[in-house]
Amino acid sequence: MLVLEPCAPRWLLNTHYMATIYDVSVMAGVSLATVSRVMNNNTKVSDKTKQKVLDAMKALGYRPNTIAQSLASNCSNSVGVLVSQLDGPFYGPMMTEIETALRTANKHVIIAAGHSDEKQEKEGVEFLMSRGCDALILDIEAVSDDYLIELSKGSTPVVFINRYIDAIKERCVYLENEQGGFMATEHILSLGHKDIAYISGPLFKLDVRDRLKGHKRALQQYNIDFDDTLCIESDFKEAGGCEAMERLLSMNKTITAVVCANDQMASGAIAVCLEHGIRVPDDISFIGYDNIPFPQYISPKLSTVSNPIHEMGKMAARWVLQEVYNDKEVIVESSFKPELFIRSSSQAISHD
Amino acid sequence: MLVLEPCAPRWLLNTHYMATIYDVSVMAGVSLATVSRVMNNNTKVSDKTKQKVLDAMKALGYRPNTIAQSLASNCSNSVGVLVSQLDGPFYGPMMTEIETALRTANKHVIIAAGHSDEKQEKEGVEFLMSRGCDALILDIEAVSDDYLIELSKGSTPVVFINRYIDAIKERCVYLENEQGGFMATEHILSLGHKDIAYISGPLFKLDVRDRLKGHKRALQQYNIDFDDTLCIESDFKEAGGCEAMERLLSMNKTITAVVCANDQMASGAIAVCLEHGIRVPDDISFIGYDNIPFPQYISPKLSTVSNPIHEMGKMAARWVLQEVYNDKEVIVESSFKPELFIRSSSQAISHD
DNA sequence: CTGTTAGCGCTTTCAC
DNA sequence: GTGAAAGCGCTAACAG
């Protein structure tokens, strides 16, 4: 654990000498402290002195050594991001926003993946902490609420994406999944459907249970019984959606609409229907969840409910900027509302 | 540029005191140097002493301060990864491999995005260098070959993904795009198609030109003239594919197959056809490029040519491990061969 | 406004 | 084998 790999001493490869604050101070004829001051411009330095220093910096091609800055200031200017998966349609858009927000503030982001596994998620946290991150942005699901509550008492500020824990709600950036689940099913119901199947994600995840809860609430509101046999737990992936749809089809029950807990499973399920000669949406209507880009460009275009994961990434980054780096300008919102996108995979039930 | 934001002193928030090497040395009754030695186990330390140190470390919950290690050793144990886009179907899988390979070796990855813009790409490089990265992995496209050649002469080792530059080919990890382009079109031609359209990516990119070159070579081999009007330059995105297909359709020319320079455009193009009532592959066959996951799960399943971007990410990480961190165990390969995946979007031409 | 000085936590000669 | 001591490059009191 503590053993380090050998590592090529960089100076061996160095072709350019890296000027230090000392070189600058000598060239400018001032003290080290003054050079430091103009870099950090937190104390007043006379314009003349400042200019001398700036000139010397330019002449020497001076670049501050961020490692030394970190050690001296006890602030690494880095924030760790730990997510479940680095691939898939979510991480990218979220990361884009985080990176942009943070780099603008001259912070850098260190990443790690938890692979939805408790041990790996904890290791990821440890890893990022030992790397001296000033703050952590976590989008993980396998660790317990208690672990995260404990974590947030530690010295490193932490913010959570896609997770709501009441005891630390001020650190949570999340989507109102129950409401989204309700909206999706409500849309289907408003179209006159009554025989509705549901393809769920892994039920150990809170967001999955919330979406399902919303689904049931909508059903109830339309006085339709929830049919447990028509509810399949799957894995959020395309192939899982295929499988689930095959099972649904093999039951030989009447189904006029399928509500899916995410777009990937919906896409798989639709593909299966089309292969079976079942028309979408003429025979079966579909609605997904998440509004990922891809299914907007297949035929039929997938109706869905939005999951503004990129916005949530941006918010988490802002939270860090505000809480850790004392940036006053940012506005932080924690709760996000889903939005319905009606496209062509869902239509009013036909009575032939 | 040199100005830093203010930053919360971490000790203000500290609830737990962080043990240092000094505390360990006192507790173990040895010197600082000895503690350092057992951490790095590069010098012999007697088993008894080592055990005392290890015990003290455990008792104190000691974690090395990586920042201090970096400053003292002039090695940050971090590698910078600069890519064009953080979102999209490529970055994720590539990143997964890089992160896994590097974290196993206890290195961390710092990321940045270049957004296919020369200025931003250069800034990204600067940013990562100033962050003290031991090495850089670059998957960028807007900067010139000369810039990269110059860069690779610098003190920070650099490796390039998805780019072939002859002068520095030992630092390039790339796909044989011409060959892939050839294979895609060859497959279509072998199916008897003669009226073939081509939807290309942005021609300023080398890989795009190579794919097109392969396309033309295949055509030539089958003695079919390349019809320039049937070749549309697009943007590698789904919507771009839609647009290109609309244009193709509006020409009212006979087209029995469309070769697309990537899967995203192919998906968009197929969706357009289906909306127009054109059957795929019965009326028009399609083949894509890249073999991204999603189009494998839509109907019809997309035939394509593989782009093992994740493998290339892994290789780049290994290159770094080998060249920078002196890891001898790894094997580095630089050139990757595309593979044909025949699915259901392409079929033999029908003569009715 | 500017200089002096003491660290930040760790690595690494150089002696013993 | 082990310890003493000199930095790594920078920040941040404290004086003046």
Image (spheres, coloured by chain):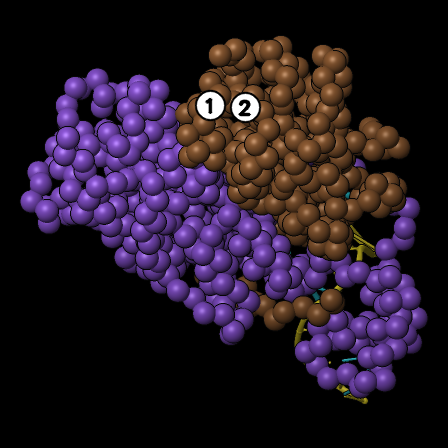
Chain colours: A brown, B purple, C yellow, D cyan
The quadrant where residue B315 appears: bottom left
Q: Nearer the viewer, residue A132 or B89?
A: B89
| Residue bearing the label numbered 1 | A280
Looking at the image, which residue is at 74% across and 67% down? A2
Q: Nearer the viewer, residue A162 or A79?
A: A162
| Residue bearing the label numbered 2 | A286
As drawn, B283 above or below A186: below
As drawn, A69 above or below A285: below
Three-letter code for the amino acid on which mark 2 is drawn: Phe
Whichever of labels 1 and 2 marks the residue nearer the N terminus, that label is: 1
Which of the chains bears the disc numbered 1? A
Q: Which quadrant is home to the N terminus of chain B?
A: top right
As drawn, B5 above or below B125: above
Judged from the image, the secondary structure of the residue bearing numbered disc 1 is loop
Looking at the image, which residue is at 62% across and 21% down? A195
Q: Is residue A303 left or right of residue B203?
A: right
Q: Number of marks in the image?
A: 2
The reply to the same-chain question for discs 1 and 2 is: yes
